[in-house]
Image (cartoon, helix red, strand yellow):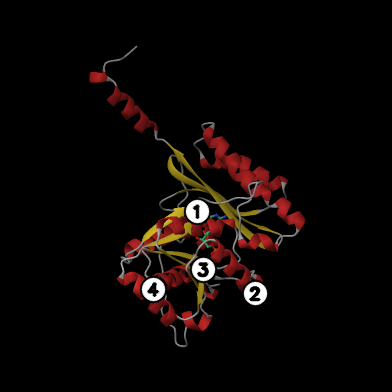
Amino acid sequence: MRTVRSLSDLRARLAEARRAGRTIGLVPTMGAFHEGHLSLMRRAREACEVVVVSLFVNPAQFNDAADLDVYPRDEDRDAAMADAEGVDYLFAPDVTEVYPDGFATSVAVRGLTDGLEGAHRGHGHFDGVTTVVSKLLNMVGPDVAYFGQKDAQQATVVRRLVRDLNFPVRIEVCPTVRAEDGLALSSRNALLSADERAQATALYRALRSVQAAVAAGERHPDRATEAGFSELATARIEPEYLAIVAADTMEPVTVIEGNVLVAVAARVGTVRLIDNVPITVMRRTLSHTETTVATPHGAPTT
Ligand code: AMP
């Protein structure tokens, strides 16, 4: 694996692969790799002939300067881990390579970014994400780019960005990788004390309890989230949000049906964590239609 710092070097190295018609996969990351990142790299390695992992702690998407300051960084460890996964290029540019003097452009997706993370971190967060993702897609020119379900709203926003601006890339979203006790892996988990790490397991328990309520037939979002709120309260966690939203719009639902997402964000100590579980509830009308179709001439079978 080769670490590349400059855009000109990256372009020169990828030009040959592109001319030869080799498929290029990109995994955008902010480093401090864990199994979640590695799962994206493995998926890219399986499907693409050239795998590029970008490592860039993007200052533009941090709404909190203290969060940026303490964000874990260990490029040597990351490079060794990416190398072990068979990654071809680690693109690790300096901030000035990405945002040279005079940089003045911003890419913004509206609507989808209003709720959840957008509401709590401000519009600037997603503007930072969509601007840097646009740049990375233009820099690398991948055929496929890999994102994690862990950041579900981000993945949905990126899909919309790519569709709206006609980026010639396929976006693939990979499942959330969890620790054995259910906590979603995150670079920020390294900042938790032992007690906070134990406390943080309540996030996934809360999501699971909402999922269980829906599986038991609850279709009202307020009632379905009750058990989740009480799991969090028991762990003395006050969530920024625990909400059920439509998976395509990220807007709160009034009835739980179709593809929805149960999403949570909370501070555990000073560390802000997010997690979600997708749920699909078949619409009753759909199964009714299927039943009707399966019955010849609508004749009752019993
Ligand atoms: P980050 O370095 O946190 O910006 O994450 C880089 C990519 O890895 C993003 O697409 C994340 O959604 C994804 N990712 C982070 N954590 C996980 C996880 N636990 N499981 C799967 N993907 C993840």
Does residue 34 sit above or below 278 in this rendering? below
Does residue 300 sit above or below 152 in this rendering? above
What label does residue 274 carry, if any? none
Camera-nearest residue between 263 and 54: 54
Image location of residue 245, percent across then percent down: 48, 49
Can you tell which quarter of the image residue 134 is in?
Answer: bottom left
Camera-nearest residue between 237 and 54: 54
User: Does the numbered disc 1 mark a residue whose Cβ is under 8 Å from ligand 1?
Assistant: yes
Extreme bottom residue here?
Answer: 101
* Labels 2 and 4: the sequence-earlier one: 4
Q: Residue at x 51, y 84 (%)?
A: 96
The alpha-carbon separation of the residues under discs 1 and 4 comes to: 28 Å
Q: Dot 1 corresponds to which residue?
A: 149
Q: Describe the element under mark 3 as helix, strand or loop.
A: helix
Q: Dot 3 corresponds to which residue?
A: 125
Q: Dot 4 corresponds to which residue?
A: 14
Crowd tier of the residue under label 2, counting other residues whose Cα lies within 10 Å: few below 14, some 14–19, many 20 or above: few
Q: Amino acid at mark 1?
A: Gln
Can you tell which quarter of the image residue 294 is in?
Answer: top left
* Labels 4 and 3: the sequence-earlier one: 4
Can you tell which quarter of the image residue 71 is in?
Answer: bottom right
Image location of residue 125, percent across then percent down: 51, 68
Q: Dot 2 corresponds to which residue?
A: 69
Image location of residue 189, percent across then percent down: 66, 59
Q: Amino acid at mark 3?
A: His
The alpha-carbon separation of the residues under discs 4 and 3 comes to: 30 Å
Q: Describe the element under mark 4 as helix, strand or loop.
A: helix
Image location of residue 46, percent across then percent down: 44, 55
Extreme top residue here?
Answer: 302
Split into 4 quadrants, where in the image is the C terminus?
A: top left
